[in-house]
Image (spheres, rainbow, N blue to C red):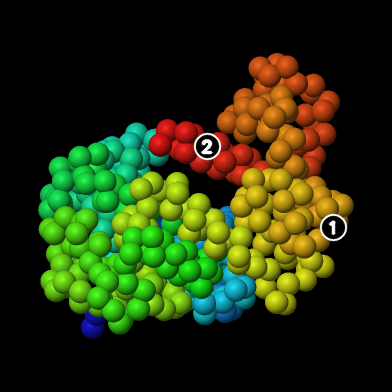
């Protein structure tokens, strides 16, 4: 008689938890946990719950994404924004009240799309695999390689490769590469730099959507697109003889790219209404990330202008405070305030304005949470000293390198916390990226 393996719940303490890697796809993070513990796919989720329960966590009502966040020492909000595809799966919402991705009151959404991937398959960049192995002795699947219509690595410009196995996330990219189980994608351009301008804008917009902290207000996005469509003398309703937005996109996009990613658009007749695209103009309902990206890439000459008129205006018009918001909730100041702090670049006054609260109350709460005002800190020697200290240098070496007073730095450390360092690193990288484009 064949022996059955023990139930995973009975071995919870023996499972090895895996922390998420930078930009690691949440579905692949779950698969890596399963592969690390040599679990069959059907046992992975139960094993994760058992491991977290054995570590002392309350796993009742936890979504898989909650569990992955806990295993990484992250809040669900931070994990959703850094490792899930929720920002591109929910670019907009019909509600004027938008909570941050991963919010505890959106449990149904965390369960439904927390580890969902926009397109089937596992995709990798050979140069990214090489760099990951040099950095961490480990390779992983990146979110930025799993965007619809993005067939190139945005960091290296090379075409992506697809894992040929039906379950790509239950092994690591470098192992698939070693086993010869990768297939190079057929692309419309040999490199991203050589791709048509429309494609380059589309790719940049799609990647930028990953940086959203919460959904946009669909009504505002539709209105911005409608206004821009009028400037191109395109049709704004099903009636009339003016060409539709889909006609304009059809004229700009390479036909091989359309056949691969938008077959309905590739086969359209002139002046044929394509709901998937043209509803953005004739409806106020949320659209998919790739539909928004195509519209913005077709209607704007630059990504900066597209985001200024569509995304930024929508963020201004969206009330990010849910109707049941209460500033007295301890949970809010111990973690849920983080997206507001990051969104407003650590500016206490901007956070207070967004929350419609007195500045004195907000700055006091943020300081108690270990989040100083970055508008003052980043311009001082203490900010540079903190970054050096966070990279591994000693306190005296860090202070000496930037001429900072050790006593003042000790005082900063008493209120500073890990999210502060992460915020400074994130904003520095975002500034570096925007400066290079």
Instruction: Report the residue marked by disc 2.
Output: 431
The total of numbered circles placed on residues is: 2
Please tell me which residue lies in front, 175 or 279: 279
Query: Counting other residues with Cα less than 10 Å from the Cα at mark 2, is it few (<14), some (14-19), or many (20 or more)?
Result: few
Q: Quadrant of the N terminus?
A: bottom left
Please tell me which residue lies in front, 199 or 384: 199
Residue 9 seen in the current view: no
Residue 156 seen in the current view: yes
Which disc, if any, is residue 72? none
Instruction: Report the residue marked by disc 1.
Output: 358
Q: Residue furthest right?
A: 360
Please tell me which residue lies in front, 245 or 296: 245
Q: Quadrant of the C terminus?
A: top left
- Vertical placement of residue 134 versus 166, above or below: above
Q: Position of residue 38 (x, y in %)?
A: 33, 62
Residue at 35% in and 44% down: 138
User: What kind of element bears circle 2?
Assistant: helix
- Left or right of 201? Residue 432 is right
User: What kind of element bears circle 1?
Assistant: loop
Residue at 70% in and 29% down: 379
- Vertical placement of residue 213 versus 403, above or below: below
CA distance for labels 1 and 2:
29 Å
Quadrant in the picture for residue 428: top right
Query: Reading the chain from its start, which is encountered first: label 1 or label 2?
Result: 1
Residue at 55% in and 42% down: 426
Q: Position of residue 349 (x, y in %)?
A: 76, 49
Q: Position of residue 358 (x, y in %)?
A: 84, 57
- Left or right of 106? Residue 143 is left
- Left or right of 406? Residue 1 is left
Residue at 75% in and 56% down: 353
Query: Counting other residues with Cα less than 10 Å from the Cα at mark 1, is it few (<14), some (14-19), or many (20 or more)?
Result: few
Quadrant in the picture for residue 316: bottom right
């Amino acid at each position: 008689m064949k022996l059955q393996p023990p139930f995973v719940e009975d071995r919870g303490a023996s499972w090895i938890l895996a922390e998420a890697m930078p930009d690691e796809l949440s579905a692949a993070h779950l698969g890596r946990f399963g592969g690390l513990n040599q679990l069959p796919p059907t046992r992975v989720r139960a094993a994760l719950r058992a491991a977290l329960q054995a570590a002392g966590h309350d796993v009742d009502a936890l979504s898989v994404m909650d569990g992955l966040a806990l295993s990484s020492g992250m809040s669900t909000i931070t994990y959703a924004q850094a490792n899930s595809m929720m920002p591109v799966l929910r670019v907009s919402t019909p509600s004027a009240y938008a909570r941050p991705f991963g919010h505890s009151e959106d449990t149904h959404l965390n369960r439904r799309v927390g580890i969902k991937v926009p397109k089937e398959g596992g995709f990798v960049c050979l140069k990214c695999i090489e760099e990951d192995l040099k950095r961490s002795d480990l390779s992983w699947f990146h979110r930025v390689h799993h965007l619809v219509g993005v067939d190139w690595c945005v960091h290296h410009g090379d075409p992506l490769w697809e894992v040929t196995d039906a379950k790509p996330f239950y092994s690591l990219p470098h192992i698939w590469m070693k086993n010869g189980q990768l297939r190079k994608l057929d692309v419309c351009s040999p490199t991203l730099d050589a791709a048509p301008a429309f494609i380059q804008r589309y790719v940049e917009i799609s990647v930028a959507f990953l940086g959203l902290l919460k959904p946009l207000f669909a009504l505002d996005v539709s209105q911005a697109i409608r206004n821009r469509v009028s400037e191109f003398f395109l049709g704004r309703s099903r009636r009339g003889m003016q060409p539709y937005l889909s006609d304009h996109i059809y004229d700009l996009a390479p036909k091989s790219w359309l056949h691969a990613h938008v077959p309905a658009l590739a086969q359209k007749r002139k002046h044929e209404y394509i709901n998937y695209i043209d509803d953005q103009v004739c409806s106020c309902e949320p659209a998919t990330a790739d539909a928004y990206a195509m519209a913005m890439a077709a209607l704007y000459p630059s990504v900066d202008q597209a985001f200024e008129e569509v995304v930024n205006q929508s963020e201004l018009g969206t009330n990010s405070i849910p109707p049941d918001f209460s500033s007295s909730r301890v949970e809010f100041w111990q973690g849920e305030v983080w997206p507001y702090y990051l969104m407003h670049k650590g500016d206490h006054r901007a956070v207070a304005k967004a929350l419609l609260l007195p500045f004195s109350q907000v700055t006091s709460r943020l300081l108690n949470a270990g989040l100083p005002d970055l508008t003052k800190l980043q311009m001082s020697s203490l900010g540079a000293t903190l970054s050096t200290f966070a990279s591994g240098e000693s306190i005296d070496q860090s202070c000496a390198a930037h001429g900072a007073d050790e006593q003042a730095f000790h005082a900063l450390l008493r209120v500073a916390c890990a999210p502060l360092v992460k915020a400074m690193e994130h904003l520095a990288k975002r500034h570096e990226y925007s400066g290079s484009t």
